[in-house]
């Protein structure tokens, strides 16, 4: 077992324009809780595994309580969370533990970036999150897994919004088109300090890359517990 140091954070959400987002306009979340640990032992790259909990603002009293909370979506590979700048994450504690490679979630990958549903599907396991380590599968067996794309603070904020939207859409029997989600994503990115000086075309390219996968992945609460983070073999 590898010794692992997990850091727990408050991820700032105060820049998200909830008031302009359909079904979320009654929210005013200031931050979400998340945790992160380095993956360098498993994949020899300076990336982190980030977990976002379905907990916001002052719901949590201690780290033990946080670790027992439901996730908002499956753990994802991310850049190290920022603790500097206008949108800095706030460290609320750390924990030491042990982890084996078999504990790490499987992640999915499609060979067709333009139309994922028509591509060949693969999954990666044991923390070897590289395309060349992909195990051939099919969409129905991996659709519930997270992808291998590298997240960052701003994309995590967008994913939180998309997951909250998906929950509300399902709960109230609403219908949102892919373009509806992309329009909302544009509002979220344009309000994020990370993208204040970013060209609109780059923002839109990022949205076109991120949104389909976020929308196609089932809501975490709808994924049977026995296959969360695991491909169906």
Image (cartoon, helix red, strand yellow):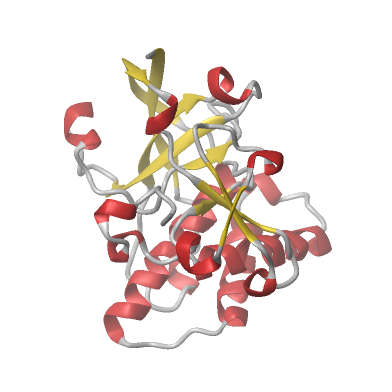
Which quarter of the figure has residue 25?
A: bottom left
| Relative side of 201 to 160, left or right | right
Q: Quadrant of the C terminus?
A: bottom left
Q: Nearer the viewer, residue 73 or 57?
A: 73
Residue 66 lies, in percent from the top left, at 23, 36
The quarter of the picture where the N terminus appears is top left
Q: Position of residue 175 (x, y in %)?
A: 44, 88
- Residue 124 screen position, x and y as percent: 56, 43
Can residue 81 be spotted in the picture?
A: no
In the image, is residue 112 above or below residue 175? above
Between 191 and 175, the residue placed more toward the observer is 175
Q: Is residue 131 above or below residue 97?
A: below
Tell me where residue 81 appears, x and y as whole percent: 54, 32
| Number of disc labels | 0
Which residue occupies 24% across, 34% down? 67
**Which residue does the image show at 54% across and 25% down from the upper left?**
39
């Amino acid at each position: 077992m590898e010794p692992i140091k997990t850091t727990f954070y408050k991820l700032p959400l105060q820049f998200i324009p909830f008031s302009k987002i359909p079904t979320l306009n009654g929210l005013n979340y200031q931050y979400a809780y998340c945790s992160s640990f380095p993956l360098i032992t498993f994949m020899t790259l300076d990336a982190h595994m980030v977990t976002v909990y379905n907990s916001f603002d002052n719901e949590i009293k201690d780290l033990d309580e946080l670790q027992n909370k439901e996730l908002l979506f499956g753990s994802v590979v991310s850049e190290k969370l920022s603790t500097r700048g206008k949108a800095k994450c706030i460290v609320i504690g750390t924990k030491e533990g042990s982890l084996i490679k078999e504990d790490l979630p499987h992640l999915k990958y499609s060979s067709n970036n333009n139309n994922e549903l028509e591509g060949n599907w693969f999954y990666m396991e044991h923390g070897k999150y590289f395309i060349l380590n992909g195990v051939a599968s099919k969409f129905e067996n991996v659709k519930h897994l997270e992808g291998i794309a590298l997240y960052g603070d701003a994309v995590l904020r967008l994913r939180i919004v998309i997951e909250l939207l998906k929950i509300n859409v399902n709960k109230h029997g609403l219908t949102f088109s892919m373009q509806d989600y992309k329009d909302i994503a544009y509002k979220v990115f344009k309000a994020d300090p990370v993208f204040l000086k970013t060209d609109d075309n780059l923002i839109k390219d990022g949205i076109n890359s991120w949104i389909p996968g976020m929308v196609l992945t089932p809501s975490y609460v709808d994924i049977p517990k026995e296959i969360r983070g695991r491909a169906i073999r």
